[in-house]
Image (tube, helix red, strand yellow):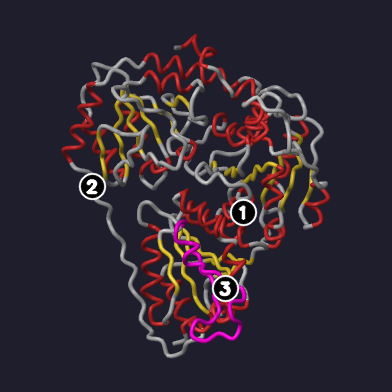
């Protein structure tokens, strides 16, 4: 069998349905083999777009998304999506081409050592030097991509290896595995620590965003009544309308929710991932922490839990819920007061109809018009904080934000993928003007795929998050303003529909109409960030009323 045919057969064996990417000269054998496969090629306009779509596929399905690029610049364009998937724990497989390795007539033309380039930002990266190795390497790559902690893997297929004939037609069976259960002694000790605590508090982090864990955590909360908060990547794991939800730790410190965090004497930390900014700071002799995850805690100066519960998170939470019996020590009344204060704080300006629109009002409208299972994807900017704090998620993976690499340029592609595999769900991509322009060419891909989705561009003609930081540090405004194209005409040039609201009410009407109509709709929305500093830079003295 031809090596490129064997590669496609190995991918089919893994259940691959789509490959996102841009082929090049060195991929032509692979491309010809793909032509006769059930796997569908989704052609994008930039390798970053393909990589972000593949990573988001992994995030939403739990199975590695696959993307394809050629050698040199095509492969180097995968580095940002690779880091995005690796830090965000999204299973993804990258396939890149390379010049012939047995004999080359072009010297070093376009040749970069991609395997070494990928090594720090992937779980597994290899060059294929023999066609017979393809099935084993594909199986190993997929296994590692999905093993906790999930992430990115990479295989390089040189042009002459892809063309090899007479390869052995051997495909390895896909064998799953069961995650180990936590030690019973650790579960018992954790239950005793929780029973002995006065003010236990539950934290839901990125690692808890797995199948089955949502149900287990909801049952724990409802049985014990322990209040909970989440990190940005833990949003939606448990329905945020739950009466025990006290908020999202969108800022590292000095927000209202940190009143509760600072007062708790025990934090049950489920799914803590070191890639997220720490939502609390530990001190020797201070708050105790129970770490529940697939792996032990990585110890550093601000995170050194007193107990590790290592194993399948859902099973660990279920067993812990069964083990907790005595709640007589608990006094959770303070957390209720914090919850009410947070709700009051977040509702401020949510009905303010000034225009350009306030981000608080934007979040309120989006939540109001989207159904429970509607999906919002975010790029990276100051609005990400507003959505993390103010937007309540009812289901897992309905707010797709990146609080790991925190890259710009991923939001549009993430929304495209979310809509592509969930055609019946309403999908909105919220992008800053800066992030949108970094991969705006993927509008053509969205139109070509006939996706029905909405893109809201928050237009302030600047890199707003950095301006907020600049102001907060007392620096003069400098170096962060630019001019934008006419986004309505820009959208129309791709065959999308462009809109420019003129008022708060007009925006809401356009958003509702766009969600109900077919096609790609781009809304150029003027936004007012003037209150960022006064609201987000909350001072400790401002919280004295509830401390």
Label 2 secondary element = loop
Between the C-alphas of marks 3 and 2, the distance is: 46 Å
Marker disc for residue 111: 3
Magenta stretch contains residue 363? no
- For disc 1, the marked residue is 413
Q: Is residue 107 left or right of residue 516?
A: left
For residue 466, side relative to residue 123 (left or right): right
Query: Residue 148: x and y, percent?
Result: 35, 52
Q: Residue at x 78, y 50 (%)?
A: 497
Crowd around label 3: few <14 · some 14–19 · many ≥20 (10 Å): few
Q: Give the label on residue 181, or none.
A: 2
Indicate yes or no whether the magenta region holds residue 118: yes
Closer mark to the observer between disc 3 and disc 2: 3
First of labels 2, 1 by sequence position: 2
Q: CA distance from mark 2 to mark 1?
A: 37 Å
Span colored in magenta: 94-121
Quadrant in which the C terminus appears: top left
């Amino acid at each position: 069998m031809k090596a490129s045919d064997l590669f496609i057969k190995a991918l089919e064996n893994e259940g691959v349905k789509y490959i996102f990417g841009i082929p090049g000269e060195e991929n032509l054998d692979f491309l010809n083999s793909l032509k006769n496969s059930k796997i569908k090629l989704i052609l994008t306009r930039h390798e970053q777009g393909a990589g972000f779509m593949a990573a988001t596929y992994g995030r939403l399905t739990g199975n590695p998304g696959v993307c394809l690029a050629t050698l040199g610049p095509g492969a180097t364009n995968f580095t940002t999506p690779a880091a995005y998937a690796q830090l965000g724990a999204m299973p993804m497989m990258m396939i890149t081409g390379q010049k012939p390795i047995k004999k080359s007539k072009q010297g070093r033309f376009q040749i970069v050592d991609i395997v070494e380039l990928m090594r720090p930002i992937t779980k597994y990266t290899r060059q294929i030097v023999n066609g017979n190795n393809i099935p084993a390497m594909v199986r190993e790559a997929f296994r590692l991509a999905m093993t906790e902690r999930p992430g990115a893997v990479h295989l390089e297929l040189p042009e002459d290896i892809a063309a090899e004939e007479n390869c052995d037609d051997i495909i390895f069976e896909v064998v799953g595995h069961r995650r180990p259960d936590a030690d019973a002694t650790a579960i018992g000790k954790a239950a005793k620590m929780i029973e002995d605590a006065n003010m236990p508090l539950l934290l839901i982090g990125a690692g808890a965003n797995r199948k089955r864990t949502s149900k287990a955590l909801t049952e724990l909360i409802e049985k014990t009544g322990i209040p909970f908060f989440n990190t940005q990547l833990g949003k939606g794991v448990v329905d945020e309308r739950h009466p025990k939800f006290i908020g999202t730790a969108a800022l590292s410190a000095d927000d209202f929710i940190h009143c509760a965090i600072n007062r708790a004497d025990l934090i049950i930390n489920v799914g803590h991932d070191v890639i997220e900014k720490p939502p609390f700071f530990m001190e020797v002799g201070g708050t105790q922490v129970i770490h529940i995850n697939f792996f032990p805690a990585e110890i550093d100066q601000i995170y050194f839990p007193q107990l590790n519960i290592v194993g399948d998170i859902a099973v660990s939470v279920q067993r812990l819920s069964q083990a907790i019996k005595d709640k007589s020590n608990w006094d959770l009344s303070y957390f209720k007061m914090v919850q009410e204060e947070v709700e009051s704080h977040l509702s401020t300006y949510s009905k303010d109809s000034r225009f350009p629109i306030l981000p608080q009002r934007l979040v309120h409208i989006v939540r109001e018009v989207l159904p429970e299972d509607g999906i919002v994807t975010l790029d990276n900017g100051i609005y990400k904080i507003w959505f993390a704090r103010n937007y309540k998620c009812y289901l897992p993976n309905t707010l797709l934000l990146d609080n790991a690499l925190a890259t710009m340029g991923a939001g549009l592609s993430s929304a495209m993928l979310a809509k592509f595999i969930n055609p019946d769900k309403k999908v909105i991509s919220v992008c800053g003007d800066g992030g949108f322009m970094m991969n705006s060419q993927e509008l053509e891909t969205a139109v070509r795929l006939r996706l029905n989705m909405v893109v809201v561009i928050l237009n302030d003609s600047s890199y707003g998050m950095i301006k907020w930081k600049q102001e907060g540090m007392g620096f003069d405004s400098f170096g962060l303003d630019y001019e934008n194209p006419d986004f309505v005409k820009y959208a129309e040039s791709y065959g999308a529909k462009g809109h420019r609201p003129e008022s708060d009410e007009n925006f809401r009407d356009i958003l509702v109409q766009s969600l109900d109509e077919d096609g790609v709709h781009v809304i150029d929305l003027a936004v007012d960030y003037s209150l960022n500093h006064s609201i987000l830079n909350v001072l400790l003295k401002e919280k004295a009323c509830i401390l």
